[in-house]
Image (cartoon, helix red, strand yellow):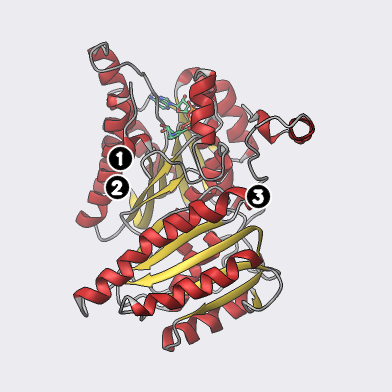
């Protein structure tokens, strides 16, 4: 379950022998619990269109990061506000600032571009949305060598204030998001940030992770626990050994159920209500693949994938919507870039993963009391991908900006973020964690 090109000795040997091997950047990862001082030593320049929004943004960021300017020698982060740019000519500020700053961004640095769309005029709307393409291209241009990520936070709700933007930006500036790049994340939900500290934000929250025995689910369970949640792992009986060990490690609980079985949903729901009174977090992670081209795919393969990946998710979530979710509950669904781009031999899987994005989005349009978002991983080093043939694995890893696969923890950190109030501005969306995969980009 590891990438041989991440081996420093092999990289040195390849260089010595002049072998044309790709050299993926080494990504810095911070796996510690979320902290108020996480970014305090990061030199971050907050620049952009001069206006009230930028002033506010600067004062918020100067409290959580080390103040830097674009004239400093090296910076760790660049936050570029494009809010208020209304004409094609205005965009020249973006061009000039980025052009003059790119060489100053440190390895593993971060670029966050902030845009805001409103209906003032078709031109300003077009200008703000056009920046999506700029930031995606920039991510591909500057990310590969030094592991720099570029993401856009696009405000689509006029009531969202700089403080709410900063809460979301905290995650994308941190070393918890090294494998997320080239994303345009909509900030569509205005909220009132009532917490003074981001530490232990999930304390006493009750969380279920389906398929939590291993892989991405196990990593997500660990992150939720680290941030203070009480974690209940749901997995199939054959995963008992792994699941039991993890539940012990997390001082959590294990429910052994195949979520596609008739009584499973009712059993899980009843247990949570009886023991905890309600559920705060539901991570719909359990998933399987069963690949074949459509002509060769049996109806059993079709049904198996749809039943686990989509039907069981809908049944479980709908049951808690009916009874059991606490107010403001957070739901996360595991999608895949295959659900966005499609993949040969995966009509069933891609359908289920597109369905996951649609379901998360539909949930929030119908229910104002919950948050629901999908996470779409690219190539992640797990048991699921370990089984793939060598060349498919290599394609999955190298056909991306960062030229490597991600780790379950990279996905888990995004899940943790989406389960916390730090992400309250994001609702009904999907975010890829794919290292800038070219697939579907
Ligand atoms: N690994 C990747 O590269 C990747 C990429 C995109 C999306 N995903 C998605 O992320 C999720 C986790 O993937 P992973 O790689 O960790 O997979 P994995 O195979 O390592 O783990 C999946 C877990 O789900 C459990 N599970 C399967 N069927 C179940 C059922 N009917 N009831 C309860 N539990 C069940 C399994 O026992 C296992 O513990 C899946 O939904 C997958 O489709 C993974």
Query: Which callout, 1 or 3, points to the residue nearer the camera?
Result: 3
Residue bearing mark 3: 29
Give yes or no for contact between labels 2 and 1 (Cβ–Cβ under 8 Å).
yes
Residue at image coords 65%, 32%: 21
Q: Is residue 322 above or below residue 165?
A: above
Residue at image coords 68%, 35%: 6
Label 2 CB sits under 8 Å from any ligand 1 atom = no
Residue at image coords 59%, 65%: 102
Q: Position of residue 333 (x, y in %)?
A: 37, 42
Give yes or no for contact between labels 1 and 3 (Cβ–Cβ under 8 Å).
no
N-term mark: 2 or 3? 3
Residue at image coords 30%, 71%: 127
Query: Which callout, 2 or 3, points to the residue nearer the camera?
Result: 3
Give the class, few, some or many, for how many residues have Cα within 10 Å of label 2's Cα (few <14, many ≥20): many
Q: Is residue 244 above or below residue 43?
A: above
Seen from the viewer's position, the closer of residues 438 and 219 is 438
Quick check: 117 left or right of 4? Answer: left
Residue bearing mark 1: 356
N-term mark: 1 or 3? 3
């Amino acid at each position: 379950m590891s990438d041989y090109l991440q081996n420093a000795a092999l990289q040195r040997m390849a260089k010595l022998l002049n072998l044309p091997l790709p050299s993926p950047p080494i990504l810095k990862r911070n796996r510690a619990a979320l902290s108020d001082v996480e970014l305090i030593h990061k030199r971050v320049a907050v620049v952009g269109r001069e206006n009230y929004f930028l002033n506010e943004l600067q004062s918020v960021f100067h409290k959580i990061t080390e103040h830097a300017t674009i004239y400093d020698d090296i910076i760790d982060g660049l936050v570029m506000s494009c809010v208020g740019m209304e004409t094609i000519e205005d965009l020249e500020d973006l061009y000039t600032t980025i052009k003059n700053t790119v060489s100053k961004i440190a390895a593993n640095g971060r670029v966050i571009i902030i845009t805001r769309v409103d209906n003032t005029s078709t031109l300003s709307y077009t200008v703000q949305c056009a920046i999506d393409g700029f930031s995606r291209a920039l991510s591909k241009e500057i990310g590969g060598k030094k592991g720099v990520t570029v993401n856009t936070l696009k405000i689509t709700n006029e009531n969202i204030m700089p403080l709410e933007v900063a809460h979301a930006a905290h995650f994308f500036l941190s070393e918890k998001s090294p494998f997320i790049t080239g994303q345009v994340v909509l900030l569509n939900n205005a909220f009132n940030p009532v917490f003074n500290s981001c530490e232990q934000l999930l304390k006493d929250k009750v969380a279920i992770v389906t398929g939590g025995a291993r892989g991405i689910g196990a990593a997500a369970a660990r992150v939720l626990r680290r941030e203070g949640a009480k974690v209940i792992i749901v997995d199939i009986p054959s995963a008992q050994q792994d699941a039991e060990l993890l539940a012990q490690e997390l001082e959590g609980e294990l429910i052994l159920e195949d979520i596609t079985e008739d009584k499973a949903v009712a059993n899980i729901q009843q247990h949570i209500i009886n023991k905890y009174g309600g559920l705060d977090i539901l991570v719909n992670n359990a998933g399987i693949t069963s690949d074949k081209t459509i002509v060769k795919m049996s109806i059993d393969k079709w049904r198996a994938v749809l039943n686990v990946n989509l039907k069981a998710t809908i049944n479980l979530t709908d049951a808690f919507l009916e009874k059991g979710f606490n107010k403001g509950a957070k739901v996360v669904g595991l999608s895949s870039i295959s659900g966005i781009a499609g993949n040969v031999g995966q009509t069933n899987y891609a359908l289920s993963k597109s369905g996951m994005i649609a379901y998360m989005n539909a949930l929030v349009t119908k229910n104002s009391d919950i948050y629901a978002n999908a996470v779409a991983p690219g190539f992640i080093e797990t048991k699921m991908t370990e089984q793939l043939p060598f060349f498919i694995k290599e394609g999955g890893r190298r056909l991306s900006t960062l030229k490597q696969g991600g780790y379950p923890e990279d996905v888990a950190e995004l899940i943790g973020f989406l389960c916390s109030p730090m992400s309250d501005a994001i609702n009904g969306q999907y975010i890829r964690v794919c290292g800038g995969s070219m697939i579907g980009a």
